[in-house]
C-alpha cells in the first residue's frame, strides 16, 4: 500500500515535525516559547498542528538566515 503524496494543505503533528527535523519535543517547545518555531494551529482537543505550507516557508526562512 502506498502513501498518497502530501498536499500543501496537509498539517503536521508535533511528533511528525520533530521526526522530520530529528529534534526532541522539548526543543520544539523551546523554539515555540522563543518565537522561533513555525506558526501553529491549536485544534479543539488542545493538540498543535503545523500547516505544511507554514513549515516549508519556515524552512526557507531558516535557509536565508544561515
Image (tube, rainbow, N blue to C red):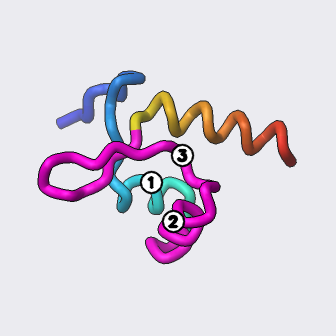
User: CA–CA distance between discs 2 and 3?
Assistant: 10 Å
- Residue at the extreme right: 66
Comes first in the chain, label 1 or label 2 = 1
Dot 1: what SS?
helix
Which residue has dot 2 on it?
28
**How many residues crowd mark 2 within 10 Å: few (<14), some (14–19), many (20+)?**
some
Q: Is residue 60 left or right of residue 44?
A: right
Which residue has dot 3 on it?
38
Which quadrant of the figure contains the N terminus?
A: top left
Mark 2 vs 3: CB contact within 8 A: no
**How many residues crowd mark 3 within 10 Å: few (<14), some (14–19), many (20+)?**
many
Q: Is residue 35 left or right of residue 54?
A: right
Q: Is residue 60 left or right of residue 13?
A: right
Q: Is 27 above or below relative to 52?
A: below
* Residue 54, image x, y percentages: 51, 34
- Which tag is nearer the camera, tag 1 or tag 3? 3
Mark 1 vs 3: CB contact within 8 A: yes
> Which residue: 72% across, 37% down?
61
Q: Magenta residues, as a range?
A: 24-50
> Which residue: 24% across, 33% down?
2
* 36 drawn magenta: yes
Which residue has dot 1 on it?
17
Mark 1 vs 2: CB contact within 8 A: yes
- Which tag is nearer the camera, tag 1 or tag 2? 2
* Residue 10, image x, y percentages: 32, 31
**How many residues crowd mark 1 within 10 Å: few (<14), some (14–19), many (20+)?**
many
> Which residue: 44% across, 34% down?
52
Amino acid at each position: 500500500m502506498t502513501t498518497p503524496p502530501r498536499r500543501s494543505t496537509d498539517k503536521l503533528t508535533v511528533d511528525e515535525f520533530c521526526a522530520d527535523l530529528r529534534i526532541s519535543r522539548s526543543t520544539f517547545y523551546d523554539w515555540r516559547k522563543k518565537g522561533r518555531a513555525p506558526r501553529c494551529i491549536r485544534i479543539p482537543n488542545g493538540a498543535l498542528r503545523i500547516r505544511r505550507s507554514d513549515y516549508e516557508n519556515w524552512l526557507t526562512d531558516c535557509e536565508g538566515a544561515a
